[in-house]
Image (spheres, rainbow, N blue to C red):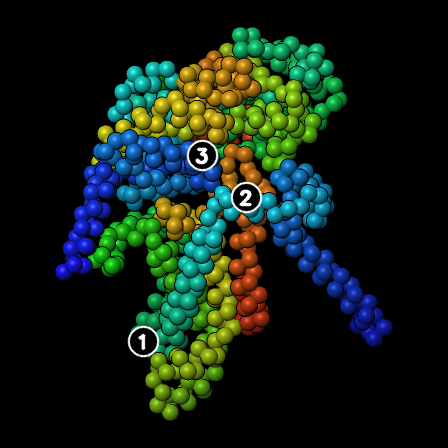
Amino acid sequence: MKFLKLSAGAMALTAGLSGHAWAQTALTMWYHGAGNEVESQIINQIVSDFNASQSDWSVTLESFPQGAYNDSVVAGALAGSLPDILDVDGPVMPNWAWSGYMQPLQIDESVIANFLPGPKGYWDGKLYSIGLWDAAVALVTRQSYLDELGLRTPTLDQPWNAEEFQAALDAAKNSGKFDYALDLGTAWTGEWYPYAFSPFLQSFGGDIVDRSTYLTAEGALNGEAAMTFGHWWQDLFANGYAPATQDGADRDTGFANGKYAFSWNGNWAALGALSTFDDTVFLPAPDLGNGPKIGAASWQFGVSASSEHPDGASAFIQFALQDKYLADFSNGIGLIPATAAAAAMTENYKDGGPMAMFFGLTEAQALVRPVTPGYVVEAKVFEKALADIANGANVEDTLDAAVDEINADIERNGGYGH
Amino acid sequence: MAIVTPENRGLRLVVRYTVLTIIAVIFCFPLVFMIMSSFKPSQQLLTDTGSLRAFLPVGDLSFDNYIEAFARAPIGLFVFNSMFVTGTTVILTLLICSMTAFSFVYLKWRGRGLVLSIILATLIVPFETIVIPLLLLASKLPWLGLHGIEWGWLNSYRVQIIPFVADGLTIFLFVQYFKDLPGELIEAARVEGASWPQIYRRIVMPLSGPVMATAAILKFLAMYNSYLWPLMVVQKEQYRPVMVGLQYFFQLNIAWGEIMAYLSLITVPVLAFYLLLQRAFIASIASTGVKG
């Protein structure tokens, strides 16, 4: 009997101590950061802080390696096993929303009023996802190179125009000091192509698809501006300014080894470049006629369509949007915080910080990739077209074929809801 | 063709072994590169790829990549998961497929030819074409667990094992091998009053070492290297196998040295298993004509 009393007492005590947790409704979350120790620590800290901050919801996190994440989500959607909260790469979000994997967020949008535009994931007029950071691409070089080649240092207010950019490439090539003037990162296949190179096309005045309707690529990807871009792109390789093919090792070490004068690279590689040369500078994208452009939108949080607790899931996401967490992610993994206030809290992006230029770059030049469910197909078509043109394919034929392929896909999918 | 004489026999042997040694070395290059690179910092590793230094233990060598790799991913868990799934699948496959083949070869039941043809026809169906129906099926199947009936097999070992415990290739291997066993042995055993299970267990299987080794190695490699299926059906880290775990190392800034360390570690079980069974494997290939 004594044992029974003791057991009952212990159970009551346990129930009392953990009553806080018992009252919480369980939410599940998938995140793409497995394998990144720092990133995992930060997201776990946010989850832990959220669970301790209130008594309604308790989030449990399952991390996936980034390379396997999208396929896992698609499989999870097919199997009906999606979590409440998931993260999604910005340009992919419209496809997942259109496919019925996601539902609109239920957060107070005044909270994100000061956010950079890139991290805001809108589809069909509704906010489906929101990111804690953005990413940006810049032209990486050394101040000493600019000085030796007699080049003006471009600024956000006064980026190089097309002629100046061409003159810079010519100067680098003619100096005989480098194997190539420009490292475009052609070794990085996949999303790098539309993310890094479609801004050149947009700076010429073209686009991957006609954004006024999203129902055709006609005129956008094979119009006069796009053809001019195509020939410019092909000439970069044909005239020896940049290598059309590249191996991963060359991409990782080429600029550091002095093989290239300029490297078109992202802010995630900036700290490495800074540590390699003490006079590393990050230059804005050139204005090729229609304004300087760079890509925008990185990973963002959203709520799955199958979540039975979208209010709880949205509450977590809103909780994660605090400046201190934005700053933590930035300090931890080097990405651009989504607000100026958070940027001021970071080592790299505060005024005078070594990567502050990237924040201004995102504010001034960022353009999100086409906001359409068809983007996932259009991106692959665009990548193949650019690779073919780089390797000598006829520009007009290649871009016309790409337009046909994109239009056929749009038609096959009933216009993707546009 | 030149005639072999006592005078040139030595020279021919030298030439033959030289060529074979060169081919063997070339085949070893990837493994040597992987192991050597696993001890080098990423920067040096990438720089060395342009020269023979990539295959030599030179430069700044250390175990740092291994230490970092263990910090980045639960490698022990992934290797255990893969070994458990692979080992269980191999054992069940050998059992089920050999019994199936036994019934096709020795039990004279009506329609066995047609059924065998259908099973062999599955060899030409790529797994990728059935993966989505299989996923939908696996996500709805019942399972009797400790807490009663559970629905859905996702996030478990069974979903990685059971769909693969029988396959057309393994059945085909056993059928071909059993057909070549002396029929007199089976007839003699039947005359002596042995039952079919006794013949399977006491006569056929003890004679099937080579085909068992071949089937085991082929199945082991297929299961140990599987990526797509576990990627789709396993969402919890506790059940992830080594190939999905490899993705942990592909971050924005790829740590090539750690990748090489991870690959070196997960290659050890494969090499050990192959070395264990290689004699029987080669004997089986020689007798069945199956190419690995």
Q: How many numbered callouts?
A: 3
Q: Residue furthest bottom?
A: B192
Image quarter (top left, top right, bottom left or bottom right) of the C terminus of chain A = top left
The amino acid at mark 2 is Glu
Name the residue: 56% across, 60% down: B271
Q: Determine if residue A76 is in view.
A: yes
Per the image, the residue denoted by label 3 is: A39
Q: Check if mark 1's residue and mark 3's residue have beta carbons within 8 Å.
A: no
Using the rendered view, name the quadrant where residue A149 is placed: top right
Q: Residue furthest top?
A: A157
Q: Residue furthest right?
A: B7
Mark in the foreground, 2 or 1: 2
Instruction: Tell me the CA gap for discs 1 and 3.
Output: 61 Å
Pinpoint residue B43: horizontal percent, then vertical percent: 64, 37
> Mark 1, chain letter?
B
> Mark 3, chain letter?
A
Name the residue: 72% across, 57% down: B22
Instruction: Tell me the CA gap for discs 2 and 1.
Output: 59 Å
Question: For this rendering, which residue is in front, A256 or B65?
Answer: B65
The amino acid at mark 3 is Glu
Residue B263 position (above or below residue B169): above
Element at label 2: helix
Residue A222 position (above or below residue B106): above
Mark 1 Cα shell of 10 Å, populated few (<14), some (14-19), many (≥20): few
Per the image, the residue denoted by label 1 is: B109
Tag of residue B68: 2
Mark 2 Cα shell of 10 Å, populated few (<14), some (14-19), many (≥20): some
